[in-house]
Amino acid sequence: MTLLLPERAPTATPPGARRRRGGDPAIRLLIVVCVLLVAIGAAIPLIAVLATAFAPDALPRYAEFFTSSVDLGILRNTLVLGALVGACGTALGFLFAFVQTRLDVPGKKILHVIAMMPIVSPPFAVATATVVLYGRRGVISNGVFGLQYDIYGLDGLVFVLSMSLFPVAYLGLLGMLRGLDPAVEEAAMNLGASRWRILRTVILPLLAPGLVAPFLLLFVEAIADLANPLVLGGDYTVLASRAYLAVTGEYDLTSASVYCVILLVPSLAMYFGQRWWLNRKVRTTITGRPSGSVHLITGWSRWPIYGLALLVAAVIVSLYSTVIIGSVTKVFGVDNTLTLDYLREVVAGPGVEAVLDTLLFAAIATPIAGVVGLMVAWLVVRHLRRTAWLLDLGGTLGVAVPGTVLGIGFVLAYRPDRYIGDFLVFPSLVGGSALAAGAVSIVLAYVIRSLPAGQRTAVGALTQLHPSIEEASTDLGASALQTFRRVTLPLIRPALLTGLSYSFARSMTSVSTIVLLVTPETKIITSQVMSAASTGRYGVAFAYCTVLTAIVLAGFLVIRFIVGAGAELHRTATSEGQQK
Amino acid sequence: MTAAAHVEAPITEPADALRPESGSGHLRLDGLTKQFRGRTGTVTAVDRVDLDVLPGEFITLLGPSGCGKTTTLRMVAGFEQATGGDILIDGKAIGHLPPQRRPMAMVFQSYALFPHMTVAENIAYGLRLQRGQRSKDEIATAMRMAVTSMNLVGMEERSPHELSGGQQQRVALARALVVQPKVLLFDEPLSNLDAKLRTAMRAEIRRIQKMFGITSIYVTHDQDEAMSMSDRIVVMNKGKVEQVARPGEIYTRPTSVFVADFIGHANFVEAAPERIEDGVATLTVLGRQLTVAAHPTVAAGANGTFLMIRPETVRLTPVTSSGNGTVLRSTFHGPSLDYEIETAAGTITATEQGGDPSEALAEGTSVDLTFDADRAYLLPRD
């Protein structure tokens, strides 16, 4: 099924016609709300970082940075880490996607679920479990193989980050492999090519452009990551952890801003490079409607590939099992006595405050992020023309800008009270004397960090929805908001569901921005996990992770219940048209 | 899916409740203009279009892609804002109203049915928006009436994607009709259907339109569709109206070479009129002196005027010698046999209805070419 709806050439859509609908007061209000939120949550903190980093007293720091072998080493470390995680994560993603779409093997559904597990994983969970299982005294590395492997450093980081981040690559490549026209493979087969030859000469060259985007995305995520380098980095310092240390250890916001700017350059370049690449790819690889059927590989050659995927799956399962088992045993691997002390500490002891606070903040932030993401997408796709890219860009900052940078931006922009004369115009949002003990800035950070997920999915769903469906509603007498509520929203409900779920998961597991915003009165699970993990209290860390995962999964169910399961609508909504 | 499955019993139910008030639905376009400001300058997509559509009339906007017909329709619907001129319904200007407040309903090219609603919900959508003015019973009654009128009984609870193309088309029509619009707008509604179904739906749309007596504007690039459905055709080119006339007049008395060429097939022979009297020109074509009807703007002795000769008015007689043409090629189309004839006045196409391909004139045959001067028309240079 394909859309037979003809595309209206974008040049034929005049700016003037949209201006009137943009003039609808409800929509104007919506634009103001979205712009304000993005400005306060993302643009101003980013500007604050840039302003500090380019202030006169910061400029000598650049000369220092580029002559200091330590600082240059940190920069090199960061880029090496990004490149390795990008490559390994993309390879893992391709492996799983290939098994899923091209091999005739059993258990593919379970393999899919396992590959998706890291998406809900709390930070530190994989890192901590890796130390316990594969570290110097690891249950597997030492207990089974008798090795004394030092997992701290680059190797550990690449392992943990690849394991945690590869689902993103997996999902993207899965879609691409499914979208690949099987007729092309049939043609190669018809000409006498072997399966290996087809993979080498047809599938990989066709997918090559598609491998670039996940690589860049993983690169960005890897160099932005703060949690894992703190727990697992050892001597291996990266820009994100260095900037964090500059703020929390040295109270040197100027240096921190300089590190941020140097981190921002590759992050933004890679992130927007990735988006540019994806947009141009659309024109070159998606050609018409796929025909023919996929021929699954049935020969012996499928087994080694399958075996590799099973091995990786086993490692993932071992890591998550360790989190759960670790939360109910005294010291997993050393003293395997069952105990509920850790869980009790988290849900009925001192930890309960953090659990409730996190849940409350995430529960406030999720609907805001989901709805604002949807609204931004709707405005960008349907109602704005020349300014669309600006709002789209603003909404995406939460993911393009590394969390540490955003956090430092919050500290710089919102720690002091802002006065005009003697009049308090903007109260402090961050630090000891902050408004609502910092809760406002935490919720704001959650919203900004998780908004892009909803925005992306909604933009995708909306661009697939032909404008004439909404025009038909307007034509029959519905106002812009009535149309949105009665037609657009129900049709993109699956995107809203996905967006809200992602937002909730991202809020609950967010750490790099949050660790800079927590105050003694506002405790957040992820920062509790961090302090537990870095002080070696693995049992407590695991207990927090288990509880966090349980809350995220329960949250998914609640969101699904509220939004309504609408996944089956998705197909009919987007592929409406004629089946000839 | 066969086309026959969609061609269902004619619509018999009279549906008075769905009829617009009699005598309303007079649509007037007054100098309607649309300019797009692009990077390279201003493009005029629709240029001062004047049009008077009478109540109950079925008008087709016809033209090649990019001629401004769809933009005109979308301005009438309110999806595009006119940059000049106005739109009036029953004497009231509506150009400033947003689309949802205009008394029109549109049938979209893709039908644009709401895929998350059933057939019944789709049809009732517009009615439910007027809930303040309508009771639930009224909505249900109107919806049921539309379902019966459109031969959709038994499909009320289906999803649009469970319907065939023709059925989707009827749902789109029903959804537009139930809100009792003063004007019904069609944006190439048949272009997604296969050829046979398209022909059947033409008749059905026209029948329904006549039954409800509703003013309609129909956009198409298919001249055959325009000819067979319309009361009047508006031929557009480059944003301007070339001609507004009944189908027969458009075909036999086009006002420009563009119209003559766009509607059906035509041969154009350059010929200077020797004399013009009461719209009748005397001229010499292919060595024969003839009198033909001439466009009012053609003057005697004018150069660069063209004589339009429709292929079906051309007669060929094979001769052994001294013919005025030679057969270049013959093409068989089923119902007709086409010839391309080389003459002193250029290549002329001739159509022989019911010609037998096995008896077609061979390439190189010398022929005597004549044509029906009563059906020829002298046109000015564009």
Image (spheres, grey):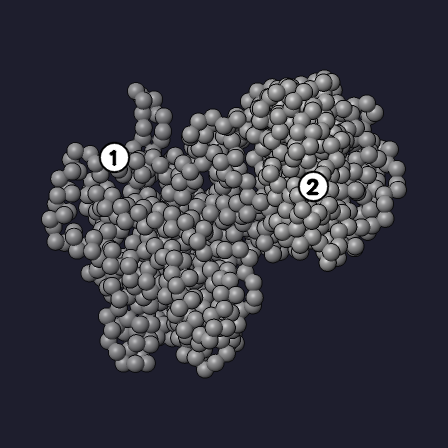
Q: Is residue A325 left or right of residue B181?
A: left
> Who's the residue at 30% across and 35% down the image?
A47
Numbered mark located on residue A283 in the image:
none
Give the camera-side residue of A115 and B209.
Answer: B209
Q: Residue at x 30, y 76 (%)?
A: A141
Q: Please indicate, yes or no, whether residue A486 appears anywhere in the rendered image.
A: no
**Residue B39 position in % (x across, y down):** 42, 30
Q: Is residue A177 left or right of residue A205?
A: right
The 10 Å Cα crowd at callout 2, few under 14, some 14 to 19, many 20 or more, is many
- x%, y% of residue B246? 75, 29
A364 up-or-down from B58: above or below: below
Q: Quadrant of the N terminus of chain B?
A: bottom right
Q: Is residue B290 left or right of residue A509?
A: right
Q: Give the spatial CA distance, label 1 vs label 2.
A: 86 Å
Please say if the residues under marks 1 and 2 sit with CB atoms less than 8 Å apart.
no
Image coordinates for residue A287, horizontal then vertical, percent: 50, 55
Tag 2 secondary structure: strand
Q: Secondary structure at mark 1?
A: helix
Foreground pick, A30 / B73: B73
Q: Nearer the viewer, residue A519 or A345?
A: A519
* Placement of A36 over or under A514, stated as above or below: above
**Residue corresponding to mark 1:** A51
> Which residue is more in the foreground, A529 or B193?
B193
Q: Name the amino acid type tagged 1.
A: Ala
